[in-house]
Amino acid sequence: MTRIGIGVGCAALGALLCALPVGPAAWAQTAPPTLEKAAASADNWAMPTLNYANTRYSSLTQINATNASRLQVAWTFSTGVLRGHEGQPLVIGNVMYLVTPFPNTVFALDLDHAERILWQYTPTQNSEVIPVMCCDTVNRGVAYGDGKIILHQADNTVVALDAMTGKEAWKQTLASYKDGATGTEAPMVVGNKVILGVSGGEFGVQGFVAALDIADGHILWKAFSEGPDNQILVDPQKTMSLGKPVGADSSVKTWKGDQWKIGGGDTWGWYSYDPKLNLLYYGSGNPSTWNPNQRPGDNKWSMTIFARDIDTGVAKWVYQMTPHDQWDYDGVNEMILADLTVDGRPVPALVHFDRNGFSYVLNRADGELIAAHKFDPAVNWATGIDMNKSSANYGRPEVVDKFAPGSSGVNVNYTGICPAALGSKDEQPAAFDPETKLFYVPTNHVCMDYEPYPVAYAAGQPYVGATLSMFPGPGGYMGRFIAFDPVTGKTAWSIDDQFSDWGGALTTAGGVVFYGTLKGYLRAVDAKTGKILYDFKTPSGIIGNVITYMHGGKQYVAVLSGVGGWAGIGLAAGLTDPHAGLGAVGGYAALKDYTTLGGQLTVFALPGS
Amino acid sequence: MTRIGIGVGCAALGALLCALPVGPAAWAQTAPPTLEKAAASADNWAMPTLNYANTRYSSLTQINATNASRLQVAWTFSTGVLRGHEGQPLVIGNVMYLVTPFPNTVFALDLDHAERILWQYTPTQNSEVIPVMCCDTVNRGVAYGDGKIILHQADNTVVALDAMTGKEAWKQTLASYKDGATGTEAPMVVGNKVILGVSGGEFGVQGFVAALDIADGHILWKAFSEGPDNQILVDPQKTMSLGKPVGADSSVKTWKGDQWKIGGGDTWGWYSYDPKLNLLYYGSGNPSTWNPNQRPGDNKWSMTIFARDIDTGVAKWVYQMTPHDQWDYDGVNEMILADLTVDGRPVPALVHFDRNGFSYVLNRADGELIAAHKFDPAVNWATGIDMNKSSANYGRPEVVDKFAPGSSGVNVNYTGICPAALGSKDEQPAAFDPETKLFYVPTNHVCMDYEPYPVAYAAGQPYVGATLSMFPGPGGYMGRFIAFDPVTGKTAWSIDDQFSDWGGALTTAGGVVFYGTLKGYLRAVDAKTGKILYDFKTPSGIIGNVITYMHGGKQYVAVLSGVGGWAGIGLAAGLTDPHAGLGAVGGYAALKDYTTLGGQLTVFALPGS
């Protein structure tokens, strides 16, 4: 008889070697790289956002518009957890790291040895945290730095794990899920600092961003979104808003009494950083409660873009996009730092696609508002943003009363508002291509009816105060993937989808844009023309963000499947009866005809070794 | 701006049509085919076993030994359920049917419309059934016939669903999970009959096979494995065993008192059928309890191959392979009906690879024993099968006492027994290639220590009476995929694997054999040489059986991933501490370094449209 070895991936080593342990980690012989060094190589995906600018633009070119149609699935990995898989893996050298939704198991996979599991870590968390998570049990990714993997658990514990062994290095807790505060976002590491925030806008959690020391987890600074100046870390004279100092008590004077203490403004989106300016950028979420008439005032600094000195936490400038929110248009979406040309002059821009349906271009150095455009023509709650610098309403949306819940009282159903509460775009990150100068934006084309009602606050209990029903936008579809110029407001091309595009985009120097759909398709698109080059049905709906990396001379593209998140909460929580009261599940109920719960990584590459 | 349609799978139809419902079923315009018609087309996989002969040999040739290395993943589907996915889908025309482990959700997928979910059905079952399932919450597949999909639920309810709509046609219950009886096997449909059995050998369930009328579910006949002649449906004069009538009371006289009432002999394996002989074939499982000294006698007809008239249920012949089982070597593995040449004469053979490590060749017409060989050289519990027709022990194993638990009393640890309780092969089906005349067998190369102890029977409680520890066989590995000739006992080639090969095999006229591994690899192998042509890492460990079908002119190969079953119960039930008492989890604990829980279908095809 003939005896055959164990096969591909082990063929070169022979059966025996393959069966042996590969050691504690693939870096056993060397120290793990610094984040700076890891991020400098295009082979890696060393940060959740790829880079501090949040461009999600990779310079890899092996996969390009000419050959992307020949992509194949290279390997796959089940995470062993169902429900919504937002976020993305990291790739650092020969190790891939990924984290699951609750219970937040972290896996380290050895790319050199057929993706063997080097280590896995599952924190001990009380399952009581699950109902406190407003929009599925998601986690948007772990971060890397100082040889550690940083996990922000659902229950708000932050844990640092030795990247080689998975052993706990330190733990820190900044807020309690018993008060409604949860952890869902991906931290960002800058130098010795771990930057992170908090979720809980539906529970009245006073939002904050904090910097922890990556060496031991101690708090370096903590800056709230609302409250007295010493809590929100603003300098009344030096912190600017649209060219003017914010003045004293800029936040508390826009709230009734001490409502700011339960005022939301949570910080569960993405973080950006400009090393030259030494500024951290992020947005704050909705003011709590969703019933606007209960909280008169502008509710500053909810719905605000913050630029903070990363060493001190003090804000250099702020810009509130949606004062006195009446729609739940959280401002947490990513800030993309891109050097653009506006009217012939170079601008160090910050570009942001907001839930409220407007794209914003600001000068990231000083917060100057340069452009604001609707990126979905369906948007009807405001006619535009007042761009007249001499106007008293400069920078504010021009609100259409009939689409503004609360404007004629509560317990009234305001109908046909576009976009819906989950926004023209939610956390799913856009990507920027410096070649085409276009932004590639996965969007929601969804409208709603919204009825605000009075609600009482109780710690750890939902503090929502509105009933809503969501439905497809004009044309009867719910998603648009767009190539958009935020300076001119022009859409270069768009791809309509039956359901929202809730997976984050990737751009590449190969001229290919990637994103995933709620039905589960991983799609490669020509960046210039919008032509679909490749469209593969992964096991479950995609709400994860596409990444790319190079290993062993081969470029890979990877994405997590696992339907869920807000758009998929109906499936994730078993609410799929199309005849039941749909509420926030809305038009997504039909997703059950296309996909089911999952939790898988699918990795693609071109054929050949 | 340019607007693009929804993409592949919808491109030809345009975006709007794609968003519309596709109707209640793809057969809306025509009646569903008969099973006979569906099974006659090689494009379909209309029975769990492909055909009544259980060959799992497909005549499709588009994928062959020359091009199999170019296979790609065509599409994937998450079942939304974790734990062990044994069994296989059905494909009938443009619809694929598959069933999950508990809660046994059935999906109908429309292959004409990008695998849209035509319907899904989840029975209401009490989760109390889960701990009653000895070896994970598996289900080995639904069956098709009379326009219905037949599901044997975990809780033992049999339900017939309209194949077009998923609506319940009828329900029947033959035994109660409260007594330890569960449903795990795939039914078989023959004419107007649904053939099915019962699981529960670890709970003292008196095994049976039954025939239900597919029109309304009423019981046509029910035949027990042990008991009085009128319960086991034997004719003392006409039912033969190794050429002799079994005589009166052939079963009860081999049991102490009425122990046969809790005697096991369960029937959770596969069923075969010879249309010419009108005989049904299957094997019965272990006698209960596992402590052999507690149940003196041969314990007939546990561990027995049955040939029954399919219309009456009366046995034409029986053959007990492992009298008075001392190892848990259930006889339920598939019976492959193959016309072989033995010593120059054609034989209508039945070939069976038993848990006990011996392959058996019998004349399926009369039960004559033709050949019996070890198919794993590690087998040591018996030196061979007595083939001397004039011997009093004719057809019985020649047992080695030191490897026979109970032979020197109970509460003694019998060490180094090969194979382990899960056998040299378990339920994972082998396949037969009529071209090579070889059988392709996924096997376990696992040994054990076994300590029997007294146990009391209580309805619905485990009735095991043994402690065991399993470990890799000689050479330090646990799996072998073999190409084997059961007439000569010769192994043509074998592929060693670190873990058991617990996924069922597929042979094809293209000269390619397919099977899956516990690490999750779907493997295509040259049937003649054993050369691995393709080796793809699916999301989770494979314990499912590979199928193939043709759709739209393209040949597909499909397999379920989802580690579990007996071999994967450690992962499925969270028992992966390598330092804990391993018991029946044994050497499989290291699986946690390679794979995690899953539940996915992966479908492969050659590139191009």
Image (cartoon, coloured by chain):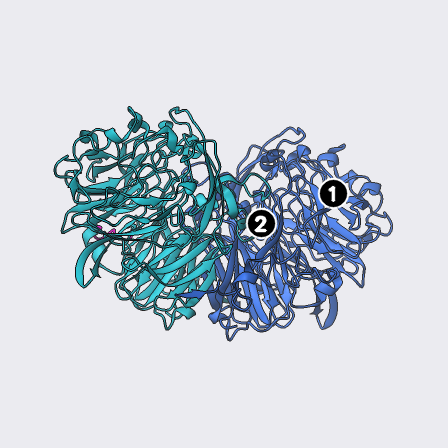
Chain colours: A blue, B cyan
Apparent side of residue B563 relative to residue B605 in the rendered image (left or right): right
Tell me where residue B184 sits by quadrant. Answer: top left
The front one of B457 and B218 is B457
Report the magenta stretch's main SS: loop
Looking at the rendered structure, whether the residues under marks 2 and 1 are on a common chain is answered as: yes
The front one of B261 and B177 is B261
The front one of A573 and A298 is A573
> Which amino acid, by three-letter code, is at mark 2?
Gly
Q: Where is residue A304 in the image (x, y as percent from the top left)?
A: 71, 49
The magenta segment is B26-33
> Which amino acid, by three-letter code, is at mark 1?
Lys
Tell me where residue B64 sits by quadrant. Answer: bottom left
Numbered mark located on residue A423 in the image: 2
Q: Which residue lies furthest to the left in this view?
A: B237
**Does the magenta-highlighted stretch encompass residue A374?**
no
Numbered mark located on residue B410 in the image: none
The residue singled out by tag 1 in the image is A171
Q: How crowded is mark 2: few (under 14 residues within 10 Å), some or many (20 or more)?
A: many
Q: What element carries label 2?
A: loop
Q: Mark 2 lies on which chain?
A: A
Q: Which chain carries label 1?
A: A
Q: Where is residue A137 in the image (x, y as percent from the top left)?
A: 58, 42
The front one of A515 and A358 is A515
**Image: B24 above or below A76:** above
